[in-house]
């Protein structure tokens, strides 16, 4: 059994307003080194340039009932500065701040939380040792 494989291969988010969500995710993830690896009509796939997994697939929801809601997704940040940049970029691109960047002792991490255009909880986290 391979133990070096990522726990998650990819996640999918279905957006009510694809264009608004694409602006949000493209801006917020770019500062974390995550970009659009694939784009087609109503689909944008995000991953790091050197590795296409794990990835996030953003898709236009085909029906109101299919919109992703209530999801919490955390993205790894390489530094506190990257968490700060994520928060600023996400808010500037239409996200709503849930928690400004700060140290969370219970997680031993510096984190920021932002709602995407559909209200999903999107986080940037930089793990630190105590």
Image (cartoon, rainbow, N blue to C red):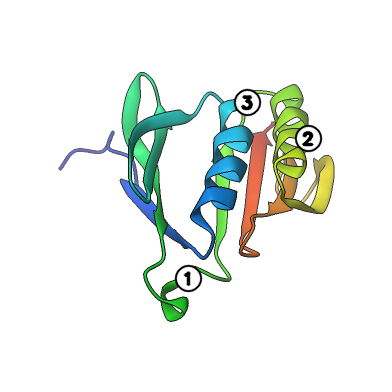
Q: Secondary structure at mark 3?
A: loop
The Cα–Cα distance between marks 1 and 2, rounded to whole angstroms, is 25 Å
Q: Identify the residue under disc 2.
A: 88
x, y percentage for residue 62?
37, 69
Nearer-N-terminus badge (3/2): 3
- Answer yes or no: do the residues labelled 3 and 1 have beta carbons within 8 Å? no
How many circles with numbers are drawn on the protein? 3
Q: Residue at x 63, y 36 (%)?
A: 28
Residue at the image position 70 percent from the left and 41 percent from the top: 93
Question: Where 62 falls versus 47 (above or below)?
Answer: below
- Residue 53 relative to residue 69: left or right: left
Q: Under tag 2, what secondary structure?
A: helix
Query: Which quadrant does the C terminus fall into?
Result: top right
Residue 120 picture quarter: bottom right
- What residue does disc 3 label? 31
105 vs 37, nearest the viewer: 37
Looking at the rendered structure, which numbered label has been put on residue 119? Answer: none
Gap in Å between the C-alphas at discs 3 and 2?
10 Å
**Residue 130 visible, this angle:** no
Instruction: Give the label on residue 67, or none.
Output: 1
Please identify, in this view, whether the residue under mark 1 or under mark 2 is nearer the observer: 1
For the point 74% across and 28% down, which residue is it?
Answer: 85
Estimate how packed mark 2 is, as few (under 14), some (14 to 19) or many (20 or more) residues with alpha carbons within 10 Å.
Answer: many
Decide which of tag 3 and tag 1 comes sooner along the chain.
3
Q: Residue furthest bottom?
A: 65
Numbered disc 1: secondary structure: loop
Nearer to the camera, 28 or 15: 15
Q: Nearer the viewer, residue 116 or 128?
A: 116
Specify whether 102 is left or right of 25: right
Question: Which residue is rendered at x = 65% and y = 39% of the image?
Answer: 125
Query: Could one spot residue 85 in this view of the protein?
Result: yes
């Amino acid at each position: 059994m391979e133990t070096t494989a990522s726990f998650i291969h990819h996640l999918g988010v279905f957006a009510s307003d694809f264009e608004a969500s694409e602006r949000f995710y493209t801006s917020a993830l770019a500062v974390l080194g995550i970009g659009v690896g694939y784009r087609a009509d109503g689909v944008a796939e995000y991953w790091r340039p050197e590795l296409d997994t794990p990835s996030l697939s953003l898709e236009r929801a085909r029906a109101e009932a299919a919109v992703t809601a209530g999801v919490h997704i955390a993205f790894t940040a390489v530094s506190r500065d990257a968490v700060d940049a994520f928060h600023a970029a996400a808010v500037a691109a239409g996200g709503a701040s849930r928690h400004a960047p700060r140290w969370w002792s219970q997680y031993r991490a510096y984190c920021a939380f932002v709602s995407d255009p559909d209200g999903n909880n999107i986080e940037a986290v930089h793990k630190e040792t105590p």
